Image (tube, rainbow, N blue to C red):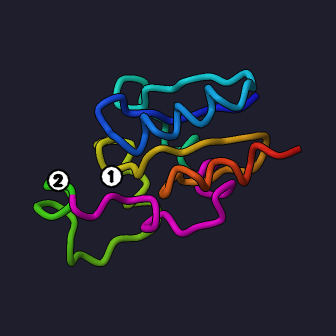
């Protein structure tokens, strides 16, 4: 099952959703600001993405700048920050099986839609 972690207020996220809609594939929308992924779910996502936790953080968010920037944080602390403040999670994230991609640019989503 394909899943998109989506923020309707984000233009890139809306563009990513449009790519999924045009693909004709069945998918699930997770509005992650309302249905925040747990720390365990974030660890799984990060594993599927093949990135470091810090690479999933939106570093221009005020919360990051005011509370976390410049601090020496462990991976677990970064994941906890994203679980506590989901606005920090980069978007959109599309998961297909055990593969995932951050849709920036949104066209990257096509990479994991292929069989």
Quadrant of the frame with the C terminus: top right
Q: Is residue 42 above or below residue 34?
A: below
| x and y, in percent, of residue 36 in the image | 42, 31
Residue 57 colored magenta? yes
Q: Which residue is mark 1?
A: 81
Q: Find the distance from the CA under tag 2 to the CA under tag 1.
A: 10 Å
Residue shown at 64% from the left, 29% from the top: 22
> What span is in magenta?
43-60
- Occupied quadrant, residue 61: bottom left
Q: Is residue 29 above or below residue 102?
A: above
N-term mark: 2 or 1? 2
Give whichever of 68, 107 is nearer the camera. Answer: 107
Quadrant of the frame with the N terminus: top right
Give whichever of 49, 37 is nearer the camera. Answer: 49
Q: What's the magenta bit mostly, secondary-structure-wise?
A: helix
Looking at the image, residue 41 sits to the left or right of residue 31; the answer is right
Circles 2 and 1, Cβ within 8 Å, touching? The answer is no
| x and y, in percent, of residue 42 in the image | 53, 46
Looking at the image, residue 89 sits to the left or right of residue 93; the answer is left
Residue 112 colored magenta? no
Residue shown at 35% from the left, 31% from the top: 33
Residue shown at 52% from the left, 40% from the top: 16
| x and y, in percent, of residue 6 in the image | 45, 33
Q: Which mark is residue 63?
A: 2
């Amino acid at each position: 099952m394909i899943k998109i972690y989506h923020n309707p207020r984000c233009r890139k996220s809306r563009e990513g959703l449009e790519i999924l809609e045009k693909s004709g594939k069945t998918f699930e929308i997770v509005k992650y600001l309302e249905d925040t992924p747990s720390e365990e779910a974030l660890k799984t996502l990060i594993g599927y993405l093949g990135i470091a936790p810090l690479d999933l953080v939106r570093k221009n968010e005020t919360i990051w700048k005011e509370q976390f920037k410049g601090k020496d944080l462990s991976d677990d602390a970064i994941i906890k920050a994203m679980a506590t403040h989901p606005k920090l999670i980069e978007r959109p994230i599309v998961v297909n099986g055990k593969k995932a991609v951050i849709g920036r640019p949104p066209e990257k989503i096509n990479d994991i839609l292929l069989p």
